[in-house]
């Protein structure tokens, strides 16, 4: 690995938003890709290969692949083999509707750790959020192909007021389908979810915490089936945090790569100009962005030491790292403000006082 200037950490993982198109029209999507049954926006392997090679020179060891929908990409299977052949660890998020025997085999042979989405235990709840009739059935068909290959996978459920009552049954369904875990993502205010907020569909902090506590009392969760509820670690028992980690991205070692070869903090760079770091298609551009981008430099200087609000007072600040500073920026316009969920919880008397400390300096 090439040497880096003092204060610049290695680039450990790329979050690869390899397509800007999706075959589903999810009402909560924060990326807001083009809704189409065919690929319209994607990063060809010929361009991606050069970006990956540049990134490996400064430490890259892993790639998380998402979209849009990754398997809408015409080269996706070949790209999995190519990336694995470069010695990279691979993760993927997919809606599962396009997984057939070939895709399942590629996931297996390249040791991809992956998640797929089920937003309820039946077509009514799932298809309502995914915006395409029949998507639940198609995802279950994809799971059949995964099971035929003996693959392990995680189920992700995005929750709102319209489907939160289906959480316990979705947990049971994930278990029965052979999933290795269930991850629950409360829908947050960004992208298309703005319309859901206006319609009163998003959960409040109190409703989110009630759903979390109720689900963790489910017999499957009590008996060891892994349930990862995406709330900040300050609200979770210390035992759970110790067992499963802090559940936040390692922001200091991650770079987002978009479907057109631009870079950003993550996929939010697609729509938020301040978090668009520019093209990576020229020789030397990955290193230049990683070392010199002003936003990345500010993150290194301020996270976690100079975070504001509740995050600046939380005992987990050195590990949680503000939970999701991209979401914070979307809502507040400031990367280093307190995470909005935690700020709202504190305002409502729901933030655990035992997790607040006084830091020196």
Image: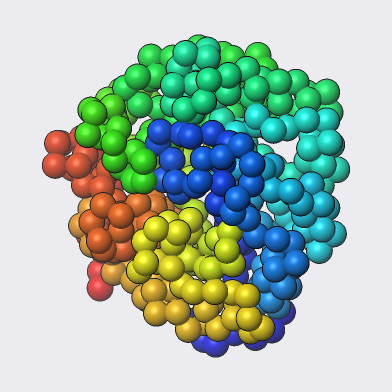
Q: Is residue 281 above or below residue 96?
A: below
Residue for point 47% across, 13% down: 124
Q: Residue at x 25, y 47 (%)?
A: 340
Quarter of the picture containing the N terminus is bottom right
Residue 85 seen: yes
| Count of picture labels | 0
Task: Relative to 83, say whether 186 is above or below.
Answer: above
Does residue 239 appear anywhere in the picture? no
Q: Nearer the viewer, residue 327 or 221?
A: 327
- In the image, taking residue 209 as reference, residue 131 lies left or right, namely right
Q: Position of residue 148 (x, y in %)?
A: 83, 23
On screen, residue 335 versus residue 78, left or right, reads left
Q: Give residue 263's position: percent from left, percent from top.
A: 52, 68
Q: Which corner quadrant of the image does residue 206 belong to?
A: top left
Residue 167 percent across, percent down from the top left:
45, 18
Res. 232 image quadrant: top left
Q: Is residue 87 left or right of residue 309?
A: right
Q: Nearer the viewer, residue 50 or 323?
A: 50
Name the residue at 25% across, 69% down: 360
**Position of residue 356 measured from the top left corner of the image (x, y, whole percent):** 24, 50
Residue located 39% across and 19% down the image: 163
Above or below, 56 against 194 in this view is below
Which one is nearer the viewer's eye here, 107 or 212? 107
Judge whether 281 appears above or below 259 on screen: below
Q: Quadrant of residue 57?
A: bottom right
Which colour scheme appears in the figure? Answer: rainbow
For the C terminus, the image quarter is bottom left
């Amino acid at each position: 690995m090439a040497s880096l200037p003092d204060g610049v950490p290695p680039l450990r993982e790329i979050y690869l938003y390899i397509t800007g198109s999706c075959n589903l029209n999810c009402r909560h999507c924060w990326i807001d890709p083009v809704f189409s049954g065919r690929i319209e926006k994607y990063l060809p392997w010929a361009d991606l290969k050069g970006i990956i090679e540049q990134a490996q020179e400064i430490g890259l060891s892993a790639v998380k692949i998402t979209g849009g929908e990754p398997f809408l990409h015409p080269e996706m299977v070949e790209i999995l083999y190519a990336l694995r052949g470069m010695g990279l660890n691979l993760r993927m998020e997919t809606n599962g509707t396009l997984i057939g025997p070939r895709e399942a085999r590629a996931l297996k042979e390249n040791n991809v750790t992956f998640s797929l989405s089920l937003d309820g235990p039946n077509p009514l709840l799932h298809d309502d959020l995914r915006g395409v009739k029949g998507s639940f059935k198609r995802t279950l068909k994809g799971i059949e192909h995964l099971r035929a290959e003996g693959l392990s996978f995680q189920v992700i459920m995005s929750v709102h007021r319209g489907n939160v009552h289906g959480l316990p049954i979705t947990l049971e369904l994930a278990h029965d389908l052979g999933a290795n875990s269930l991850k629950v993502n409360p829908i947050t205010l960004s992208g298309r979810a703005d319309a859901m907020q206006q319609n009163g569909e998003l959960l409040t902090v109190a409703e989110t915490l009630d759903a979390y506590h109720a689900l963790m009392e489910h017999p499957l969760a009590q008996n060891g089936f892994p349930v990862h509820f995406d709330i900040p670690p300050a609200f979770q028992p210390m035992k759970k945090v110790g067992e499963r980690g802090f559940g936040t991205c390692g922001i200091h070692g991650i770079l987002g790569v978009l479907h057109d070869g631009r870079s950003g903090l993550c996929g939010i760079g697609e729509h938020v100009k301040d978090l668009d770091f520019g093209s990576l298609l020229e020789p030397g551009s990955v290193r230049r962005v990683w070392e010199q981008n002003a936003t990345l430099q500010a993150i290194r200087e301020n996270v976690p030491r100079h975070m504001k609000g509740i995050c600046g007072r939380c005992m987990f600040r050195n590990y949680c790292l503000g939970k999701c500073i991209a979401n914070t920026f979307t809502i507040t316009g400031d990367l280093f403000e307190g995470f909005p969920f935690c700020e709202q919880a504190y305002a409502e008397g729901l933030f655990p006082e035992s997790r607040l400390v006084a830091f020196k300096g």
